[in-house]
Image: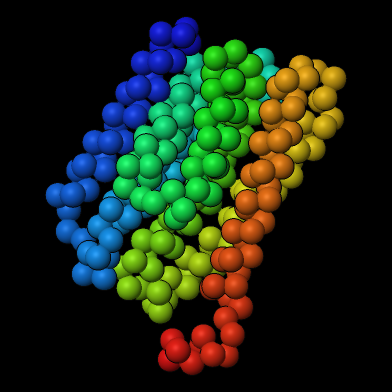
Amino acid sequence: MELNSVILTTGCSVGFFKLVNTGLKALPIPDSACRNAWKWRNISTSFVHSIITGIWAVLCFYLHPQMAEDLISTHSVFSHALVCVSIGYFIYDFCDMVFNQKITQSWELLFHHTVVITCFGISVLTRRYVGFAVVALLVEINSVFLHLRQVLRMAGQAKTTSYRVNSMINLGTYVVFRINTLAWMTRWLVLNRDRVPLFSYTVGSVGLAIMTAMNIVLFYRLLRSDFLKTGREAKKEI
């Protein structure tokens, strides 16, 4: 994809997710989520992004298996477009949080989005490491269940069987598609250090270090919230 196509695809992605968010206003919202309708729409939009990009990332490797053998220079237009679409979503979500939420409440996600946009931006503009970026997007498979967890909690379904089942799937996919993927990416970057320019290696290493730290903290929060409740917390739920 040429630069014009990259800009157009990214711009269309920003517009698409804005339309998704706007369209959600026409749908009914659970009573328990009405007090924070913005957050309900924001999480639902993120849920849509996760479904699209999670499936898309798997298809990239299925339709173009050669990319798995060379994550640096081998990629298809299909995979290049995926990374552009994902950049568009993160740009949209960044702006949505800046305009609708206090910085003190969203700084972690804003920081996360900045790192992702920077790393993915280098990839699509240089047309290098697109395969590596697609590997990173495999984490969106877990994000489907992570966002569904938030939706269920906001809908007042935190004590239901469906929530419990989703929590177990969420934790399992978290280990497989987040922690394992980040570990594999770190290993790949170290093993291929001689093939990656210093600037890209530095940006990639810093980005992975930040993502790994944030995901370990989030994993602990999920584990504590859904599986390691204290006696006092359990009594409150009963």
Q: Is residue 105 above or below residue 56?
A: below
Residue at left 40%, top 79%? 159
Picture layout, residue 38 above or below residue 69: below
Residue 55 appears at what percent x and percent y?
47, 39
Q: Locate residue 19 relative to residue 143 in the image: left or right.
A: left
Q: Nearer the viewer, residue 38 or 194?
A: 38
Who is closer to the viewer here, 21 or 206?
206
Percent from the top left, x then y, of residue 167? 51, 67
Residue shown at 65%/28% (left/top)?
132
Residue under the point 58% across and 35% down: 115
In the picture, measured across the screen, residue 201 lies left or right of residue 148, that is right
Colour option used? rainbow
The quadrant in which the C terminus is found is bottom left
Disc count in the image?
0
Q: Is residue 8 above or below residue 55?
A: above
**Which residue lies most toward the left here?**
26
Q: Is residue 47 visible?
A: no
Q: Position of residue 74 (x, y in %)?
A: 64, 16
In percent of width and height, residue 143 lies at 49, 50
Judge whether 119 appears above or below 146 on screen: above
Question: Where, by quadrant of the figure, is residue 73 drawn?
Answer: top right
Confirm whether residue 114 shows in the render. yes
Q: Report whether 23 appears left or right of 104.
A: left
Residue at image point 32% right, 42% down? 99
